[in-house]
């Protein structure tokens, strides 16, 4: 049966539009920081897991192999898992099953993304995510899948642009307190500011989109007996879940992310959670676009379908809420930056810090015993969920 | 808790496959594997697919995996690795006790890539190596040279690998790459990156393969053909080709772990035969030594004496390996698992060995990687 | 806590020493059984779907297996070229993030005669050149019709349909 798995240390680099460091160097810095916090040497690490999104960003085929030495994997068991944008949260799930299985006692989980190498713009790398037979010939654009989904979501639940803009306002404000936030991303904005920004693919406005970012993140996880030997207050991985829906994305009603619900149910079951709205105290849903946070909160069953926007208006998801569930206290992808895989792991690290009470100015007001991080990816198709507890 | 292979399905490797899309090809393999396992896709708890984006020509190929496996709205993810490493991922998931049945998929549509050397080049270090603009096979040429030189082998030694594997493939009868060819004839083929010749390279092929594994309870319920994953290991060496020493370090690390799990002291005595990556002829010998089947510098002699032949003491690649079946990239390892299971079940036709009970499978991710893994399979009952 | 990373501004970035690479990355993907037939149909102005007798769904894009029932599909069904808009967007950005004055209007369109939610990605046309015009002219649920390339110019590709345009209601 599964052994319990704990997080012992975490590391992050700054989030940057253009980093001077290479991808390997970013991976190294995050990994080194995580090992330092765990008070461990790389020689004590049994296996290494890597998460990184499309090879086309870096222009490197077999990118996992290429990054391996930066992540400290030389002569070690090493794997790269891949679920597109969901990879960052999947990385800890990947590490979890390698340790929970009893195959390994310690695992270094690294997520790296260097998007600025891709010319003329990293968005171009995303064109190749569409179906090559029927979609790419249309001259597609990454933004479309989001704008089409957002439109459907707004249409079905009759949600206004003003409400969705509130997500940007909240997360960009929260991001001000994150030490790694990307320059020019966080700030005090009003709904009016958001809706005065450029319409890039209606209903998506520029300030509803997370930026292009270079960064890396890492965590160290261990089995129960290693954790108890090394620390008095480990943070536990209580539940994990992931789920992939059909690749025929135009054959689904996009208004609801069923795959996120299935992933969440898997994680809740594993963690023995019956009523997530009471038992989850802080949440980091994936917010590459403003509406996505609401969409995902519904998928996570933390709000009824169509209700997340109404709760948002009431401040239910705010960082200083007393009776709500703080959502994206880190500032999320909108407020800190979006280095795809590293962004997902940053969310896991935020929950880790919140549970340890070490989130500084970002520490939520209410008491937290359990938190959830979630990422999303592929063709609006995959949900990855992890639940951590004290 | 033990983990077993309960189903295998193959859309056989072939030069081209214009008659089917990748989806249709994978569907064929999945249908066969589920039938073989006696399950339906709804019974499966978790799926792992192996792929690399640049080989597919698609960013985030993970997207296109679920439908043809019947895996929509199920836990599915991609591992960018060789077959043994991929199986290790699924194996670990079953071992957690949260999953009962798992499915591993890999496929190749290498024929759809117009300029292979350009895809290979993308895997070379963009600062130090790629700008030299040499055909990426030079990496194999250099490593082969180092390997031969350090052991005092010559090109005729590796030509014996080609002759053995092509002949085995011809006898097995599934592949179009099989042929009776002598080692001397291999030396007549064109030089690609000296000492590497055209026939030293496993020819690219298309295909799909699906493997179903399950925990003990499910496997024993099913009853027949109990094939246990007795040991598994995987490792990375370094992506810096300048650091390579010609010894397949990754397999040494992987083998240590797999042997210790399976309780193997002397692999040649404790195991009956092997499927070993031979994407390049010298790789088979290099891997044989890294796996400790013979000592450093002894593999060529053993090969020439027939030690690794079909009728030899320790048959290696009885169905022809990658040289005989085609190089299907990340699917190579699954094809090897498939063929090893055929042998253990006694279904290997013309190349059936005499009631083998255990198999060693060693997989490599392919050029220009230094990662791979090792699996030990054992038949029970 | 110290966080590593040297952030470069655009000007500094341009001054950095860089290595450039343009790979010749070209592919010719096998369309297979279902899509080959579908593309052939487009060449002749026909839109073909595939039906699964087990679940009864009429599916487009067509596929030779039903992913839900996990069995081969059974029958080709010729659809009309009219559909309804499930969702749409008004896009002012090109693939490389450069901006465009005249928007493109991608939409998910369900072709009439297919099953629920059975949409395909395509574009809308003849609906205006500004955001305001498009939003006035396009509504979710609206009926649209394909505008085809001239028969001689068709090549068996999704682009044989130029775009979909609204069906004018008779007064």
Image (cartoon, coloured by chain):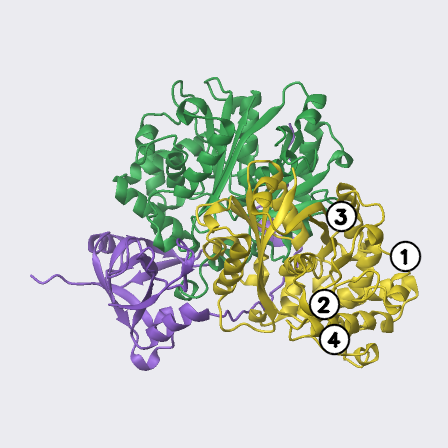
Q: Which mark is residue B351?
A: 2
Q: Which mark is residue C142?
A: none
Q: What shade does chain A have?
A: green
Label 2 – label 3 distance at C-alpha: 28 Å
In the displayed structure image, the side of residue A316 where residue A364 appears, left or right? right
Q: Secondary structure at mark 3?
A: helix
Task: Say which residue label 1 marks.
Answer: B296
Q: Secondary structure at mark 2?
A: helix
User: Residue A10: percent from the left, percent from the top?
Assistant: 63, 31
**Chain drawn in yellow:** B
**Chain drawn in purple:** C
Q: Are marks 4 and 3 in contact (CB under 8 Å)?
A: no
Query: Is residue A24 in sight in this rendering?
Result: no
Task: Say which residue label 4 marks.
Answer: B198
Judge by depth and name the residue closer to the eye, B262 or B64: B262
Outermost right residue: B152
Query: Is residue A145 in sight in this rendering?
Result: yes
């Amino acid at each position: 049966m599964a052994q319990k798995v704990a997080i012992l240390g975490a590391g992050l680099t700054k989030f940057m539009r253009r980093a001077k460091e290479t991808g390997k160097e970013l991976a190294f810095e995050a990994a080194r920081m995580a090992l330092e916090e765990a008070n461990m040497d790389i020689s004590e690490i049994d296996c290494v897991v890597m998460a990184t999104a499309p090879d086309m960003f870096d222009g490197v085929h077999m990118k996992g192999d290429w990054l391996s030495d930066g992540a400290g994997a030389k002569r070690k068991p090493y794997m790269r898992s891949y679920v597109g944008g969901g990879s960052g949260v999947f990385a800890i799930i990947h590490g979890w099953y390698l340790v929970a299985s009893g195959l390994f006692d310690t695992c270094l989980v690294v997520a790296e993304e260097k998007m600025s190498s891709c010319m003329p713009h990293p968005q171009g790398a995303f064109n190749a995510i569409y179906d090559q037979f029927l979609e790419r010939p249309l001259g597609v654009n990454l933004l479309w899948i989001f704008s089409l989904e957002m439109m459907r979501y707004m249409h079905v639940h009759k949600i206004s642009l003003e409400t969705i803009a509130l997500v940007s306002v909240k997360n960009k404000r929260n991001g001000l307190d994150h030490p790694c936030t990307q320059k020019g991303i966080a700030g005090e904005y009003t709904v009016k500011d958001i809706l005065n920004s450029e319409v890039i693919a209606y209903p998506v406005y520029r300030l509803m989109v997370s930026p292009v970012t270079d960064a890396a993140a890492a965590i160290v996880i261990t089995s129960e007996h290693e954790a108890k030997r090394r620390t008095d207050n480990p943070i536990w991985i209580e539940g994990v879940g992931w789920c992939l829906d059909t690749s025929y994305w135009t054959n689904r009603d996009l208004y609801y992310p069923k795959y996120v619900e299935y992933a969440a149910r898997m994680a809740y079951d594993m963690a023995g959670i019956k009523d997530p709205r009471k038992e989850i105290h802080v949440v980091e849903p994936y917010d590459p676009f403003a509406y996505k946070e609401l969409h995902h909160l519904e998928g996570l069953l933390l709000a009824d379908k169509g209700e997340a926007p109404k709760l948002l208006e009431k401040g239910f998801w705010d960082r200083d809420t007393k009776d709500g569930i703080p959502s994206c206290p880190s500032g999320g992808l909108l407020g800190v930056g979006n280095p795809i895989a590293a962004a997902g792991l940053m969310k896991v690290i935020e929950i880790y810090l919140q549970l340890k009470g070490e989130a500084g100015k970002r520490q939520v007001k209410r008491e937290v015993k359990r938190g959830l991080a979630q990422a999303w990816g592929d063709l609006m198709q995959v949900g990855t969920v992890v639940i951590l507890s004290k | 808790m033990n983990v077993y292979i309960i189903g295998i399905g193959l859309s056989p490797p072939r030069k081209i496959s214009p008659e089917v899309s990748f989806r249709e090809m994978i569907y064929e393999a999945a249908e066969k594997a589920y039938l073989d396992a006696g399950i339906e896709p709804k019974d499966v708890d978790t799926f792992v697919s192996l792929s690399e984006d640049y080989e597919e020509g698609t960013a985030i190929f993970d997207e296109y995996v679920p439908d043809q496996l019947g895996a929509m709205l199920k836990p599915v993810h991609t591992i960018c690795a060789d077959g043994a490493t991929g199986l290790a991922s699924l194996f670990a998931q079953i071992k957690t006790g949260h999953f009962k049945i798992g499915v591993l998929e890999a496929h190749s549509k290498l024929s759809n890539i117009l300029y292979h050397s350009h895809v290979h080049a993308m895997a070379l270090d963009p600062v130090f190596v790629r700008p030299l603009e040499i055909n990426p096979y030079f990496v194999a040429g250099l490593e082969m040279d180092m390997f031969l030189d350090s052991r005092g082998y010559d090109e005729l030694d590796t030509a014996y690998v080609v002759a053995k594997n092509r002949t085995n493939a011809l006898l097995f009868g599934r592949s179009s790459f099989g042929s009776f060819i002598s080692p001397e004839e291999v030396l007549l083929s064109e030089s690609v990156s000296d000492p590497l010749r055209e026939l030293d390279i496993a020819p690219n092929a298309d295909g799909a393969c699906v493997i179903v594994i399950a925990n003990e309870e499910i496997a024993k319920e099913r009853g027949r053909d109990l094939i246990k994953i007795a040991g598994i290991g995987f490792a990375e060496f370094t992506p810096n080709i300048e650091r390579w020493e010609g010894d397949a370090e990754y397999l040494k690390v992987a083998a240590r772990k797999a042997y210790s799990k399976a309780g193997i002291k002397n692999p040649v005595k404790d195991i009956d035969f092997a499927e070993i990556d031979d994407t390049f002829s010298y790789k088979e010998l290099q891997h044989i030594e890294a796996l400790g089947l013979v000592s450093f510098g002894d593999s060529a002699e053993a090969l020439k004496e027939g030690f690794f032949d079909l009728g030899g003491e320790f048959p290696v690649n009885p169905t022809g390996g990658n040289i005989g079946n085609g190089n299907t990239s990340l699917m190579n390892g699954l094809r090897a698992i498939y063929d090893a299971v055929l042998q253990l079940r006694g279904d290997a036709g013309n190349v059936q060995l005499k009631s083998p009970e255990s198999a060693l499978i060693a997989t490599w991710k392919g050029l220009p990687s230094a990662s791979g893994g090792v699996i030990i399979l054992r038949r029970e009952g | 806590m110290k966080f590593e990373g040297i952030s470069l501004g655009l000007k500094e970035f341009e001054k950095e020493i860089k290595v450039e690479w343009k790979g010749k990355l070209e592919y010719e993907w096998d369309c297979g059984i279902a899509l080959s037939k579908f593309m052939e149909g487009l060449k002749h102005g026909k839109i073909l779907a595939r039906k699964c007798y087990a679940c009864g769904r009429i599916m487009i894009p067509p596929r030779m297996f039903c992913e839900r029932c996990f069995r081969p599909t059974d029958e080709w069904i010729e659809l009309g070229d009219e559909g309804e808009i499930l969702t749409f967007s008004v896009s002012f950005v090109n693939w490389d993030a450069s901006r465009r004055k005249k928007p493109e209007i991608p939409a998910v369109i369900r072709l009439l005669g297919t099953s629920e939610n059975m949409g395909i990605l395509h574009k809308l046309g003849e609906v205006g050149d500004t955001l305001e015009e498009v939003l006035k002219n396009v509504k979710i649920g609206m009926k649209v019709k394909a505008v085809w390339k001239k028969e001689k110019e068709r090549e068996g590709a999704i682009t044989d349909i130029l775009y979909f345009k609204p069906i004018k209601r008779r007064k």
